[in-house]
Amino acid sequence: MGTILRTWSYQYQWLYDGISAIAALSVGGEARFRILSLQDLIIRGDTKVLDLCCGSGQATSVLVQRSQDVTGLDASPLSLERAQKNVPQAQYVEGLAEEMPFADNLFDLVHTSVAMHEMRPKQLRQILAEVYRVLKPGGIFTLVDFHRPTNPIFWPGVAIFLLLFETETAWQLLDTDLVGLLKEIGFEVKEPKLYAGGSLQVIQARKV
């Protein structure tokens, strides 16, 4: 169960941004963090991109620098209002990640940043299946999220962060085999890349 700090971080944009910036120092700063999941990907001006669970547009701001066809999806009207103000170059749609209001085989790339740890196990599986549905054949799903640290030095910092700002679903993700789930759904998955002592994972999967 997250503390009052979690509630405040969603109410106050400046606090959320500050926490994000501090957390990103573990990988060299926020600018580098935002491109971790985009490395090795070819994104052209006409690449049709979905920023899944886009929040207030932090990652969307990077995606619109690479593509002129970016859509942000989020269930929170407040977040979408902030995203529209922060990154007006993108289109925004209100909706649930597990029931996306999009046609099949629509996007070339689906991206999500530190959002899957908010989902319950059943919900997570539904979302991954929806990502597969809305991607074009050959399309890529790329994500960055928490991972069980491989370097014990990072455990105290991760544990404190999760206790203060996250809920039990974040702890559940640490024990979830995301690669296995993606393969079950039908994705072809690259070897995950780990950062910050293994506390962050980047996974890229292709719809076959």
Image (cartoon, rainbow, N blue to C red):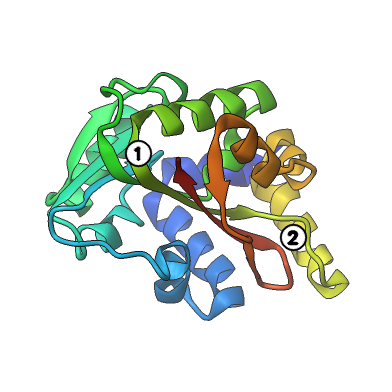
Does 95 appear above or below 37? Answer: above
Q: Quadrant of the C terminus?
A: top left
Residue 89 lies, in percent from the top left, at 12, 51
102 to the left or right of 10:
left
SS class, disc 2: helix
> Which residue type carries mark 1?
Pro
The image quadrant where one finds the N terminus is top right
Specify the label residue 158 is tagged with: 2
The CA span between labels 2 and 1 is: 36 Å
Residue 137 badge:
1
Residue closer to the observer: 171 or 4: 171
Where residue 51 appears, as percent x and y from the top left, is 33, 45
Image: 34 above or below 8: below
Q: Is residue 26 left or right of residue 101?
A: right
Crowd around label 1: few <14 · some 14–19 · many ≥20 (10 Å): some
Q: Count the marks.
A: 2
- Residue at (36, 45) in percent of width and height: 139
Please state which amino acid type lies under the numbered disc 2.
Val
Q: Residue furthest front?
A: 208
Q: Bin the neighbour count of mark 2 within 10 Å (Cα to Cα): few under 14, some 14-19, many 20 and up.
A: some
Mark before the other along the chain sequence, 2 or 1: 1
Q: Vertically, is 5 above or below 97?
A: below
